[in-house]
Amino acid sequence: MKKYFLTSAKISLVLVYFVIFAGAFVRLTGSGMGCPDWPKCFGYYIPPTEKQELLFTSGKKYEKGQVIIKDETLLVVKKDFVAKTNFDTINWEKYTKHDYAIFNPLHTWVEYINRLLGALAGLFCLLTFFLSITYWQERKKLVLLAFLVCVLMSFQAWLGKTVVDSVLSPVKITVHMLAALVIITFQLYLTYTVQSKKTIASVNSKLYKILLFAITLTLTQILMGTGVREHVDTIAETGAPKVLWLQNPTILFYIHRSFSILVLLTNLYLFVQNRKLHLGLKKINGILILIVAEIVTGILMYYLNFPFGSQTIHVVIATLLFGLQFYMILENKEKKLLN
């Protein structure tokens, strides 16, 4: 069974990135409340495609937990019954988590697909854990880490529920994002430790510290970015046009924007040293490309008023950058040459 562990771990990692992309796309399209309940969607395992399906229909068989929209209110079926001609309140109770009662088929299915990807990623993380048990005798840490990934995925699922119940609280969305980064680091470590061939470049202690400094800068930048995004979301929720979203930004926005220069210069230094000393840091090229792309999308959002897709790409690039830097650190942590 060991031979399947690496494949399962890689698939889990890819699926988590897909979930991050899907989550960013949910935000981009404003589909976060496409499914107002959790884990089902309007009380269904497969959500409706037309609003008519969510209106009271005489003669229809309703099952406990299913939801309808009546008078701009969500009502939940108390128990299984067949609807008579007239609506009877005795069979229904008001949904109390929130009062959001809007159906948009696009939003519903975007959010539903996001949840399906999350469930699929969770299943593969669980499979990876079961496969990791074959390493128990020689690598107990590996098994425990795979188990911790499952715990974190469960936490993510619960957090997703609280995000919906809070009608997309910006703070909870931020925690949701940061938890995903933690899961990525653990999954990258799992993948790295069982690689049959490890490419370990030779870096001195000074450059290794700069590698750590670089990823710290990236994480700090992501944290500040989530703060900026919370501010933008708050403005966007008022219905203000995109041109006003960053008209009066907080000081955090200016710090976040200027901080990108430090991130770029730090990684440029690593790039130059890599070429000069022939260190073999192959991933530094990809890192620089991602940083430039991140800066470009940031410029597009600010100067072109958030063109479609720019926010999603910005978020996904940030997570890819963090993951690539972390993996490069893993490749170099075991072999550091002293000056």
Image (cartoon, rainbow, N blue to C red):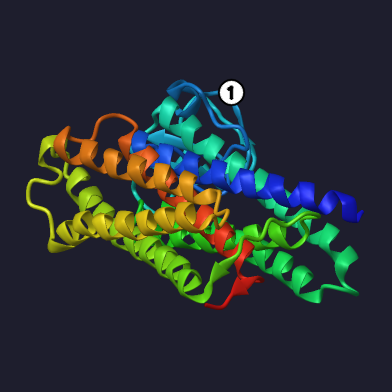
Residue 110 as seen in the image, left or right of residue 280: left
Q: Residue at x 41, y 42 (%)?
A: 289
- Across and down, in percent, residue 266 comes to 34, 61
Residue 246 as seen in the image, left or right of residue 204: left
Q: Residue at x 47, y 29 (%)?
A: 54
**Amino acid at circle 1:** Gly
Residue 90 as seen in the image, left or right of residue 151: left
Residue under numbered circle 1 = 59
**Between 201 and 241, the one nearer to me in the picture:** 201
Where the N terminus falls, by quadrant? Answer: bottom right
Residue 52 sits above or below residue 132 on the image: above
- Location of residue 148 (image quadrant): bottom right
**Between 122 and 100, the one nearer to me in the picture:** 122
- Location of residue 196 (image quadrant): bottom right
What is the count of numbered marks?
A: 1
**Between 1 and 117, the one nearer to me in the picture:** 1
Residue 318 as seen in the image, left or right of residue 91: left
Q: Residue at x 68, y 56 (%)?
A: 199
Q: Residue at x 38, y 38 (%)?
A: 313
- Across and down, in percent, residue 179 comes to 50, 62
- Across and down, in percent, residue 276 comes to 45, 55
- Location of residue 191 (image quadrant): bottom right
- Across and down, in percent, residue 332 comes to 60, 65
Q: Is residue 261 visible?
A: yes
Kind of element beneath mark 1? loop
Residue 18 sits above or below residue 254 on the image: above
Q: Is residue 71 visible?
A: no
- CA neighbours of label 1 inside 10 A, class few (<14), some (14 to 19), many (20+): few
